[in-house]
Amino acid sequence: MFAFFNKNDPATDENVELDAQRIPAHVAIIMDGNGRWAKSRHLPRVAGHKEGMNTVKKITIAASDLGVKVLTLYAFSTENWKRPTDEVNYLMQLPVSFFDTFVPDLVKHNVRVQVMGYTDQLPAKTQKAVRDAVADTQACDGMVLNFALNYGSRAEMVTGIQAIAQQVQAGKLTVDQIDERTVDDALMTSALGQYHDPDLLIRTSGEERISNFLLWQIAYSELVFTDVKWPDFTATTLKACIADFQHRDRRFGGLSDHK
């Protein structure tokens, strides 16, 4: 079962204690609240996105230091194209600026970049920045920083179903052979191997919805919703969310030993 939880900033206690043996292997984050953060400070929305980029840098290092294996960040959805043109253009420039300044730190911390989504639809300069970051970090074997860029879960599922149907049509697969593993392998998270499903999904800024993100993969993820806007999200906030996760009883549809 999903576990829904809402709270204000959970990081009021700077001394959050974590069980190092129960760190979620895959943490996924819906980074929400950049625009509202900026508006509350009478700044343009793009100022919130810029500050949010700095938060990505801090949280990437924090997650890596904690022992997280995969950090998936919802950077740009297939629906975000509906935003004002100036904002979309700025968002398309962000990966260029981000990787230009941050790749050396990623290499230093042994973090490898992966990107999932319909990246072929991105502007050429954004595609190049993504390709270069993936190439420059490919030798790293620590945490995977997985960006969902021009990603939407329903589109991902349609693409995956089409790929499976093509296998059936080509005689490489029978209908009876289609199982959960077949679907897992057809989705964009298949490149993450054993960590394809998030253990913990965090959404910032107080909204309590999934927004077309990893709908298949979060079937048994623990969900944490925090009112903290993404630019205000800190390493301590991350630790508090993980502490919340560690207090959950994950049963995967079954019963606990003590129930």
Image (cartoon, rainbow, N blue to C red):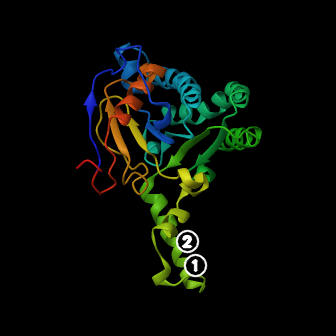
The residue at the far bottom in this view is: 171
- Residue ID for mark 1: 167
**Cα gap from disc 1 to disc 2, whole angstroms:** 6 Å
Left or right of 52? Residue 3 is: left
Q: Position of residue 9 (x, y in %)?
A: 33, 20
User: Would you identify the image quadrant in which residue 106 lies?
Assistant: top right
Q: Which three-letter amino acid code belongs to the residue tagged 2? A: Ala
The residue at the far left in this view is: 259
Q: Which three-letter amino acid code belongs to the residue tagged 1? A: Gln
For the residues labelled 1 and 2, say whether their Cβ atoms are less than 8 Å apart. yes
- What residue appears at the point 26 percent right and 31 percent down from the top-left corner? 6
Left or right of 116? Residue 103 is: right
Q: Position of residue 109 (x, y in %)?
A: 68, 28
**Element under disc 2:** helix
User: Would you identify the image quadrant in which residue 140 lies?
Assistant: top right
**Element under disc 1:** helix
Q: 61 or 214: which is nearer to us?
A: 61
In the image, is residue 235 above or below residue 82?
above
